[in-house]
Image (tube, coloured by chain):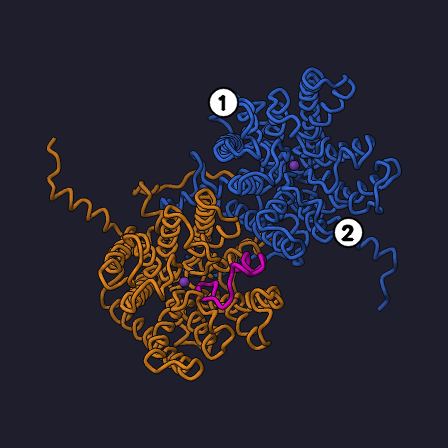
Chain colours: A blue, B orange
Amino acid sequence: MALPSRRSRWSALVTALAHPVRILPVTFVVGSIVGTLILLLPGMRSEGQSGNGLLEASFTSVSAVTVTGLSTVDTSTYWTPLGQVVVLVLVQIGGFGFVTLATILGVVVGGRIGLRSRLAAQVDLHLVNLGEVIPLVKRILTTMLAFEAAVAVVLTVGFASRHGEGWGDAAWHGVFYSVMAFNNAGFALASDSLVGYAGDAALILPISLAVFVGAMGFPVLAELSKRWRRPERWSIHTRLTVWGSFLLLGAGTLLFAVVEWNNSATMGSMTFTEKLVTSIEGGVMPRSGGFNSIDYAEARPETTLISTIMMFIGGGSASTAGGIKITTFFLLGYVILAEVRGDPDVAIGSRRIGASTLRQALTVALLAVMLVVVGTLALLAMAEVTLEEALFEVTSAFGTTGLSMGVTGTLPPGAQVVLMTLMLIGRVGTVATASALALRTQPRRFHLPEERPIIG
Amino acid sequence: MALPSRRSRWSALVTALAHPVRILPVTFVVGSIVGTLILLLPGMRSEGQSGNGLLEASFTSVSAVTVTGLSTVDTSTYWTPLGQVVVLVLVQIGGFGFVTLATILGVVVGGRIGLRSRLAAQVDLHLVNLGEVIPLVKRILTTMLAFEAAVAVVLTVGFASRHGEGWGDAAWHGVFYSVMAFNNAGFALASDSLVGYAGDAALILPISLAVFVGAMGFPVLAELSKRWRRPERWSIHTRLTVWGSFLLLGAGTLLFAVVEWNNSATMGSMTFTEKLVTSIEGGVMPRSGGFNSIDYAEARPETTLISTIMMFIGGGSASTAGGIKITTFFLLGYVILAEVRGDPDVAIGSRRIGASTLRQALTVALLAVMLVVVGTLALLAMAEVTLEEALFEVTSAFGTTGLSMGVTGTLPPGAQVVLMTLMLIGRVGTVATASALALRTQPRRFHLPEERPIIG
Ligand SMILES: [K+]
Ligand SMILES: [K+]
């Protein structure tokens, strides 16, 4: 038997990597590598930094492309202004790219088939024709840029009028934070994130609003733009996402306020209004903006646990937010309700949720739990951190949130690679990742006889 | 309209409490109250204890009836020998009672209907007739007592020959630990559990074996006694429980050994054999025997996290072990596998698992997660404990495990009540509890139109 020629081996590799279920993972890995190479170019790092910078560049690139915002270095001092622009561009490309791909997969192909089949179907171009895709991409791009521009203007005025910055600096800061906020990427131009602007409603509220809107996801924003006056005609997806977002915002803000109100290490010494603004920020950011005006290392353990749960839940599907997604979380809640009540169907409003949708939700949530647990164990084994710290940083990476208790920069290289892996898997999606790695490609086509083990 | 007479109000209350879905919860609450009253009788507490002893008595009673073994006092010194006998009897009644009730519900009524309906159906005596139940109860009782007697003899010889105890003491210790082990209740006659016998294979291995067998559950033991030579004919339930138990035992032992082997605060200074024995014990006990030969407060955080997960999973259905149960855990694993592979059915061997079974498994697991999270938050808010400690004690209570990092006795009364509640809910089962509390009794009978939100 002749060995395959170099050319045919190469084309076999390309074919394997271009397999539909591998497109998302491969795109993000390639994007991260390109970003790393750019950040390694001369002029990106500030003078006087030690080491070859490979780990710093790759961590920053992965964190930017996955719109996370976790960082092992201080973005404002380690990178030159040019390097910071590169980070900004990587965030914008990563955010726009993911939202576009996820919207095409989710909306055009729709939820008619299992997650894996859905991924496989997209390149079957009978389903996704270019005539539908190009206007969609244009609408997404226009919406993003228009929203970012509006917020950038508001922020620029805030930076100039309230923090004494020249218009040039103010505009750069305005654009930077607007892009970061709408893309749910928590990079900041100060080592302590937004602590320097803590409680300033004119900056924190617009940034929080941009994060909140960005985390809804394009499919929801598109439906709202058409039907925002008639909530009774919204799809189940939009209803779950919108009401779920407000519910989590309310609960998160309330719990943050209750727990931290008098904590002198966080917001105990602020004015009433500042506390209110900071609490809203504390309710918004864990899902998954990643900015902070308090030091999470000083927060009470209730706050870090609640924030960890919020990071795990994340934002809307096909959005720049991460986590298992709001729809997944609330669907699972409806399953519990139906089972406890003894209902034969899981119903939301007057609509039934099918068994295969529930199976997808379950899979997404369980794979996420597995990943977070394994990642936490890895961090505990590799570094001297507490369970609270390990769980927080790992969930922040998996949820592409970017909040930190301050230990990410102190982790050994191996643990940093764990976080990088989690950011990539968290962005691509656990099911897509697992499917891309799965070996069997011929699913079973026939039904087997049923059996019921005892549960619980 | 006339007010209902006192008599009719009383009978309405009895009817409400005797409603089928409330039988299990009410039984365990009543059992705990009776146990508390007995432990408050004169002669139960040792001389010189302060306070009225109500909290100590009720915590011990709940812990014993739910076969947990968590304790706020030192069983060996706080209670008189008579008090210790009461604890032993409460454990035996709690363990036998639960296994009997759960076996009747699970095996005779079977998995033909939803969990809530299954609970409702049992008192519909067409399904459970006494002719089937009485022989079943006899078999359960005979099996338990025979096994306990055999282990008690082995242990008695061990205590007498290897630890210089007189035959009277040795027999009492042998009976005590045998009953505790087979009922998966982690009460010990020393303040440091089994640390005094650490690594003694002649005692630790029989105790571990009794815990392991007890955690299989009667339905599995009954099937094994008939068909142990022919694994290919076992039901899915037995297969999942048996292979799952061995898999978790192997994984737990291995991870415990790897992490703790050289930890000088736990087993670093033991001999090779002692380390092996202690590792096996460390693999068995978290699901959910509750004995320990190392101080979990000194274990590495990886060990406490892995043990927490094992406590959460627990043992077999209709057994004296707690947790979400092995079948629930592995069924959810099969769901992930099917979804990632793109299979239309969730299959185990050549059997399909139905959507309603999966919905039950999902509900059991998610309610458990909710409970553990809420309990952990409550402990963090009420006491000065770390996340690691709070999560460990709460999961131990929910999983009716009985392992402790040593903080249960130091918690304020409110937090101890939280743990008592968790033990009761953990024993009765999350779904049974939620159903008992649910208000709507008329489930929806018709099917609604289907809709598929985007997942993940
Ligand atoms: K983020
Ligand atoms: K126990």
Mark 2 belongs to chain: A
Q: Quadrant of the N terminus of chain A?
A: bottom right
On whether disc 1 and disc 2 are found on a single subunit, the reply is: yes
Q: Residue at x 83, y 57 (%)?
A: A9
Say few, some or many: other residues with alpha carbon within 10 Å of mark 2 (under 14 / 14 to 19 / 20 or more). Answer: few
Residue A230 image label: 1
The image quadrant that residue B142 belongs to is bottom left
The image quadrant that residue B184 belongs to is bottom left
Look at the numbered disc 2 and say if its residue's Cβ is closer than 8 Å to ligand 1. no
Check the image and report above or below for A142 versus B450: above
Asked whether, in this view, residue A36 is left or right of residue A411, the answer is right
Check the image and report above or below for B174 versus A208: below
Q: Residue at x 63, y 45 (%)?
A: A393
Q: Nearer the viewer, residue B341 or A43?
A: A43
Circle 1 or circle 2, nearest the eye: 1
Q: Which residues are magenta?
A: B285-307
Q: Residue at x 12, y 30 (%)?
A: B1
- Give the image quadrant in which the ligand numbered 1 is located: top right
- The answer to whether one can see residue B145 in this image is yes
Q: Position of residue B308 (x, y in %)?
A: 51, 57
What's the amino acid at mark 1?
Arg
Residue A15 image label: 2
What's the amino acid at mark 2?
Thr
Asked whether, in this view, residue A387 is left or right of residue A144, the answer is left
